[in-house]
Image (cartoon, helix red, strand yellow):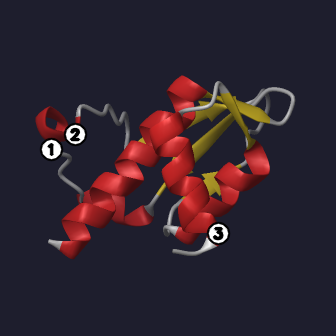
Amino acid sequence: MNKREKRFENWLNNSPKEIPFSGFKSIVEENGLKLANPASGSHYKIYNPEWDNFQHEESRSGLDIRNNTFSVPVHKNRIKKRYYKTVLEFIKYLQEKENA
């Protein structure tokens, strides 16, 4: 397990109150997702062009995706637990689905 995988698992399982945006960004991009800079304000959009055809199994994962994007607010270069945890759980769900 490399350093980034350890960080991913640590953030997912130990759930610190906030995490740095730079580390979050690298994990998101490593997993094939895109981050769109906010036109104004502080909410970054996380998306994947493949989601246009993606049928989300909401009941199984317990996640909510609106318009095939996640919206994540970043304040003082930090992301709060409730936002990063949802995205990391979704990434883990996609990884498990891919490996099945």
Residue in the picture at 83% in, 36% down: 77
Is 41 drawn above or below residue 100 in the view shown? above
Residue 72: x and y in percent read 60, 34
> For mark 1, what is the residue?
57
Is residue 75 visible from the viewing direction of this image?
yes
Amino acid type at circle 2 is Ser
Q: From this view, report whether residue 47 is shown above or below residue 13.
A: below
Left/right placement of residue 8 relative to residue 86 reads right
Type of amino acid under label 3: Lys
Q: Please state which of residues 19 and 13 is positioned toward the viewer in this rendering.
A: 13
> Dot 1 lies on which element?
loop
Q: Residue at x 57, y 70 (%)?
A: 30
**Residue 61 bears which disc, if any?**
2
Q: Is residue 41 above or below residue 67?
A: above
Residue beneath disc 3: 3
Q: From the viewer's perspective, tell me whether residue 13 is left or right of residue 51.
A: right
Marks 2 & 3, CB-CB < 8 Å contact = no
Q: CA distance from mark 3 to mark 1?
A: 30 Å
Q: Is residue 93 left or right of residue 86?
A: left
Q: Which secondary structure, mark 2?
A: helix
Residue 98's place in the image compared with 14, above or below, is below
**Label 3 residue SS:** helix
Q: Answer whether labels 2 and 1 touch (C-beta < 8 Å).
A: yes
